[in-house]
Image (cartoon, rainbow, N blue to C red):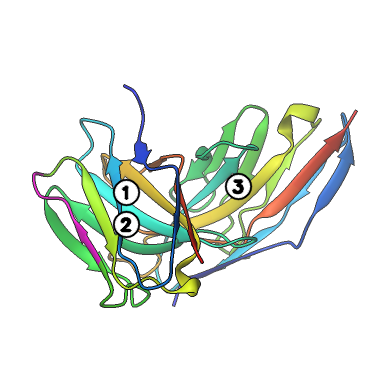
């Protein structure tokens, strides 16, 4: 079945550092890919998405590119802020080519940014 | 648009008791999803509805679990004869799919503790 693997955390950075959180997936079809973020005490929020190969999703300074050849969707940000401290989840839907609804999530990566 | 709401936010129950959770989706969304999240893991899909029809159920959803969405608006998730392994955060999400894009908006979750 479909699966998503994220780099193990937690990740600790200083403010203004460069961020990469790796995400790779396994799917039989051509899924849509997502990054969700969960800030402390809040619900999951969609951060960005890409629906086909080579698409780049971007939001709030974060970017991720759908790489079909490497089955990856790595999250990057050039300069993190303390307010980016959160748990980040990579997810896919439609991996079996039929159901474009249910999301399959990775295990999450905890990011802590220090001033 | 008030977002997805869930009630209660927290529930503590004794093993063997029945519990019911409610989810109110964003009003114009026709899809509603239930997920379960345990500590340190990403959410796992349980079931979803398109309007009032339950279209897919995960194998995680044992026969002690039942979900309804009687009028295509709010949904309830009932767990009968709760077990300690049912302790988790139960998340609800809703969406209004457009083509391959099915952006799901999550509620704050109901945290269940079974003692």
Question: Percent from the top left, x then y, of residue A10?
Answer: 80, 54
How would you rate the neighbour count of disc 1 (Cα within 10 Å): few for under 14, some for 14-19, many for 20 or more? some
Q: Secondary structure at mark 2?
A: loop
Quadrant holding the N terminus of chain B: top left
- Estimate how packed mark 3 is, as few (under 14), some (14 to 19) or many (20 or more) residues with alpha carbons within 10 Å: many
Q: Do tag 3 and tag 2 residues touch (Cβ < 8 Å)?
A: no
Identify the residue at horizontal 78%, vertical 58% (top origin). Answer: A9
- Residue nearer the viewer, B89 or A111: B89
Spot the residue most to the front: B14
Measuring from the top left, give residue B100's x and y in whole percent.
32, 48
Going by the image, does A83 lie left or right of A90?
right
**Residue name at image x 20 percent, y 31 percent:** B28
Query: Which disc is residue A65 wearing?
Result: 3
Q: In the image, which residues are magenta?
A: B66-71
User: Residue A100's mark?
Assistant: 2
Name the residue carrying label 1. Answer: B100
């Amino acid at each position: 079945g479909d699966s998503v693997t994220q780099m193990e955390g937690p990740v600790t950075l200083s403010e203004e550092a460069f961020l990469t959180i790796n995400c790779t997936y396994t799917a039989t079809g051509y899924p849509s890919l997502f990054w969700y973020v969960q800030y402390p005490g809040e619900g999951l929020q969609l951060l960005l998405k890409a629906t086909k190969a080579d698409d780049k999703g971007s939001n709030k300074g974060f970017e991720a590119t759908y790489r079909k050849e490497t089955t990856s969707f790595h999250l990057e940000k050039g300069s993190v802020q303390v307010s980016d401290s959160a748990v980040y989840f990579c997810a896919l839907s439609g991996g079996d080519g039929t159901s474009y609804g249910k999301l399959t999530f990775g295990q999450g990566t905890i990011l802590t940014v220090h001033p | 648009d008030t977002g997805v709401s869930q009630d209660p936010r927290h529930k503590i129950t004794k093993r063997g008791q029945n519990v019911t959770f409610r989810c109110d989706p964003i009003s114009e969304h026709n899809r509603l999803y239930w997920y379960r999240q345990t500590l340190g893991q990403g959410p796992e899909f349980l079931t979803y509805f398109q309007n009032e029809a339950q279209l897919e159920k995960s194998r995680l959803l044992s026969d002690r679990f039942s979900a309804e969405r009687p009028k295509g608006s709010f949904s309830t998730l009932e767990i009968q004869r709760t077990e300690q392994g049912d302790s988790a955060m139960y998340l609800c999400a809703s969406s209004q799919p457009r083509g391959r894009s099915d952006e799901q908006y999550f509620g704050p979750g109901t945290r269940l503790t079974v003692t």
